[in-house]
Amino acid sequence: MTDEPAPESSAHTRRTVLKSTAAAAAGTVVASHHTSVASAETAHTGGARTRVTLSVNGERHRIAIEPRVTLLDALRDRLGLTGTKKGCDRGECGACTVLADGERIKSCLTLAVMRQGAEITTVEGLTRGDDLHPVQEAFIRHDAFQCGACTPGQIMSAVACIDEGHAGSEAEIREWMSGNLCRCAAYQNIVAAVADAAEEGRR
Amino acid sequence: MTGLVGRGVARVDGRAKVTGAARYAADHEIPGMLHGHLVLSTVARGEITELDTSAALALPGVVAVLTHRDLPPLRVPSFPYLKGFVPMQDTRVHHSGQPVAHVVAETPEQAREAANLVRVRYRAERPTAHLAHALDEAFLPPLFRDEPNEFVRGDAGAALEAAAVRVEQDYSSPMMHHNPIEPHSSTAVWDGNSLTLYESAQGIVFTRRVVSIAFDLPEANIRIISPYLGGGFGAKGPTWSHTLLNAAVAREVGRPVRVTLTRAQMYTMNGHRAEYRRNLRLGATREGRLTAIVDTSTAQLTRTDHGVYNTSESTLRLYDCPNVHVRQLGVRLDLPSSSYMRSPETTAHFGLETALDELAHELGVDPVELRIRNHASADPHSGEPYSSKHLLDCYRIAARAFGWARRDPRPGSMRDGNVRVGWGMATETHTFSAIQSNVELTVDVDGRATLRAATQEIGTGTYTVITQVAADELGMPLEHVTTLLGDTAYPDAALSAASATVASVIGPVSQAAQDARKAVIALAVADPRSPLHGVPAEDVVAERGYLFARGDRGRRDSYRGALARHGRPVIVTGSRLNSSGHSYGAVFVEVRFDPRLATLRVSRVVTAYDPGRVLNHRTAHGQVIGGVTWGIGFALMEHTMVDPHTARVVNPNLSTYLVPVSADTPSVESFFVDRPDKGSTALGARGFGETPGTGVPAAIGNAIFHATGRRLRDVPFTRDKLL
């Protein structure tokens, strides 16, 4: 966190920002759409933008966004990096998985302003020129996807899973890749692809 | 013909999908686009009495908040628009989670916040939310899509009465949701009276028709674009109200607008598998020959539509039983419309295949043997012979690979330490449709081919299989053929549903590619500048992009050479028709149950199928592992819960609506008989995608009975039912 003082970034947790949404969604009032969404909670946004510097795939981007913008939405809607997918927007499906300083994170659960010091890698950043990353190649070789909507997240998760040393056996891969849902259910091919790429890395 | 068809070639869209280059509906950049967010009703039944948009409108960035007061009248389209009403046309609320306002803002965050500031008050009426509370209101719904809901063959009542052995039980399954990973997204761009939609649609041609009716616009003024689809499983087959409302809103505000459903909104906006109760009565001889089946199901319907989407097809047609009575009843509830969800016939098939296992146990007959004794060698309902059917081979192949002969049939007899092991099986089957489809194939002046069709890639491998078939018939390398899908600017073609795509599209592709090859060969042999000049056309073969004289391979031309000399593209079309039918298979399952913790694992699955000719073994296997995993979800976890007082879905998310993850699933072994069905014009391939998985819930339940002696008839088989 070199660009941004720590108190500034920690002040904008996603929990605070989205409280209003949660309050309305969880409201038990049946006869009316509960509208007493605390104005105090929305007052700090009011459309005000802040300058944010993001380092993505080795490139620095300066953008002006509201502090409540998630890293996922910043990548997709502001930087045009739509390879990262939004499946649930609440950390359940893993489609938005990216690397932050090499660690896999769900980019829907973090705000862009909180990740200014980090080096973000998305699926677009894995290739070297025309050459695919070994995990991308293994996914094609093993038919480890069908519709492709979860695939960028699976691949980013797989890259980290291998780096973490969690790809030693089929059972271990299944456990450590279970944060990424694949509704087409290409799981056994994903497991084979991750095992193959891990093996290739060890050679 | 170069042997490409059948080979498990890697997906041609693989690179686009693993690099993030593939553009899904919400990925298209549209200049000047605004973001929409829907406000959904919080009551299930009643009237809107007050709608205050002032706080929302006051928020920075908000461009408009539209309600029923602002929208122009939209006509209610018929199938495949299922709801029976268009929301935001009046004050009536038909279900919880129905759109009541549409907020449009400069950013998605502003739109979402503003949606929470829209104040809506209702005069709420008490909803009926549960099937169990209204079973006495069950009725036989009228025709749906020209199909009745009652079928009679022979005299099932009398045959049941006279049967030596009877099984009568109730089976049930809850509401379930498709949950494709890509949420529905629709972006409307108006240009005068013309509309372009970037859409997550399983049937762009159908979406165009629905939009055309709703807006009273000629179809020629509407273009639907959907080059990639992030899964659908039926959720994106019908056109849903957000597409119509968003297009109406975009027209009102005069700018492009995108609306993307939230995960929670996907639990009320785009259909679901309906809850079902089923009473099944089987009558049989002591030898296990079925003499009667009476299948009475009751589905959850709404007050605005009466579609029964989970038909009892396998009860009617799978086994050779002379007396069958099927009734598909329904009960009207205050819930969102249900719809088709992957392998809809699973719902009925679960009951039938469980009941057969109960009959086998009762008779002391092996479950596989019981199915063989009742095998139908002609369609039992129509009497028509099958053009091809190798289900008996499927039983034999899968049983042998599984090791079924080693099964001790006594429940609880097979153990591994403290763990009880159970083996169960079921037949797998599903209907496939054939839909009139057209394709256009262009061989360009560079000698490369481009195929265009307004069908979609839903993930099943449509781009790949079409490219494979075209390249094979043309005699070109795979990389010389480009397939373009997902745009209504291309010729009308099948929707990606009802296992219809291969059955419908492959015939036209094959026909167009053959015609193109013949047309180019004709050009070459007629051209004095071609080395093939004067060779009889029937003696010219095409391979890897080259054209050879048979028997004299030194006389060689190429697509590139022939087209370059011709100076303009060769364009042909294909539209060969096919007919619908069924694909078959068998699934064998091993479960391991630990009685100390009531934990259940599906540890082994072996399957064998007869889908006619297999066009690509990789993508076919992909449908097997997908379908089997869906079967595991159906059997063990998937369950949408509705609050009985408010009629609201209480688990509209992926942390409480559980779908299988990697650690829940075993690796599946699959075999294919792989013999062409002469009755199919799709190179002998049948529709197949929805066959795998149909038998899995019953096979798992049958395996649980084998492991524990306990018969479960209500899915999902959650731990509370296993304790």
Image (cartoon, helix red, strand yellow):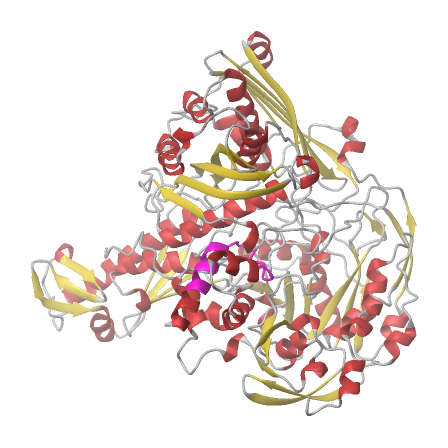
Vertical relation: B242 (above or below) B695: below
Q: Quadrant of the C terminus of chain B?
A: top right
Q: Residue at x 65, y 74 (%)?
A: A72
Residue B191: image location, x then y, percent: 63, 72
Residue A74: image location, x then y, percent: 66, 79
Q: Which is nearer the eye, B49 or B489?
A: B49
Q: Which is nearer the eye, B651 or B339?
A: B651
Residue that sits furthest to the top in the current view: B162
Vertical relation: B557 (above or below) A67: above
Q: Quadrant of the N terminus of chain B?
A: bottom left
Residue B654: image location, x then y, percent: 67, 56
Q: Is residue A50 magenta?
A: no
Vertical relation: B341 (above or below) B184: above
Range drawn in magenta: A177-195
Q: Residue at x 52, y 30 (%)?
A: B314
Left or right: B673, with A62 as reference point: left
Q: Is residue A186 magenta?
A: yes
Task: Count up the numbered dots.
Answer: 0
Left or right: B25, with B97 as reference point: left
Residue B304: image location, x then y, percent: 75, 42
Q: Where on the picture, by quarter, is residue B239? A: bottom right
Q: Is residue B253 visible?
A: yes
Q: Is residue B13 visible?
A: no
